[in-house]
Image (spheres, helix red, strand yellow):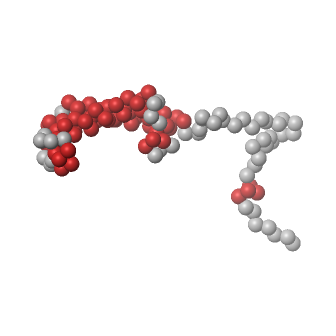
């Protein structure tokens, strides 16, 4: 008796498999730019862009209150941006987050830029 262990490759059906005879199905492959997770990437892209927009807007408008609420000075900002550099750094973080949200929403920047494919 010849016993053989089945591997994963033995159990996978070919792409052009059809259950009936004479009904060959064409194996349509998605275009290179499409993926199975395109809906996920689109949803995540919009979620991140809205989140970055809100955070950027809040940092830009309320940078003074946020800095006073946190109560800590950013050392490198005070050193390189001068006196009050922490306030200016939070304002700049807000501008960068706002611009990044716009680029992400319009599709100029992809999620792969963040390390997410």
Compared across the picture, whether 55 is left or right of 65 comes to: right
Residue 74 visible in rendering: no
Q: How many marks?
A: 0
- Image location of residue 70, percent across then percent down: 16, 45
**Which picture quadrant has residue 51?**
top left
- Image location of residue 81, percent across then percent down: 18, 41
Q: Nearer the viewer, residue 99 or 1?
A: 99
Compared across the picture, whether 12 is left or right of 63 comes to: right
Q: Quadrant of the N terminus?
A: bottom right
Q: Residue at point 15% right, 48% down? A: 72
Residue 41 visible in rendering: yes
In the rendered image, the vertical position of residue 54 relative to residue 9, given as above or below: above
Compared across the picture, whether 86 is left or right of 24 comes to: left
Q: Nearer the viewer, residue 37 or 99?
A: 99
- Image location of residue 60, percent across then percent down: 23, 32
- Image location of residue 91, percent across then percent down: 22, 35
Q: Residue at point 66% right, 35% down? A: 30
**Which picture quadrant has residue 63?**
top left
Q: Which residue is the extreme one toward the bottom?
A: 1
Compared across the picture, whether 29 is left or right of 88 comes to: right
**Which picture quadrant has residue 109?**
top left
């Amino acid at each position: 008796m010849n016993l053989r262990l089945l591997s994963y490759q033995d159990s996978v059906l070919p792409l052009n498999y059809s259950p009936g005879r004479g009904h060959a199905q064409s194996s349509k492959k998605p275009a290179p730019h499409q993926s199975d997770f395109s809906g996920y990437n689109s949803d995540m892209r919009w979620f991140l862009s809205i989140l970055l927009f809100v955070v950027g807007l809040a940092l830009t408008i309320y940078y003074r209150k946020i800095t006073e609420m946190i109560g800590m000075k950013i050392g490198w900002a005070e050193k390189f941006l001068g006196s009050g550099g922490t306030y200016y750094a939070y304002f700049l973080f807000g501008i960068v987050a706002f611009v990044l949200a716009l680029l992400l929403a319009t599709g100029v920047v992809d999620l792969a830029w963040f390390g997410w494919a």
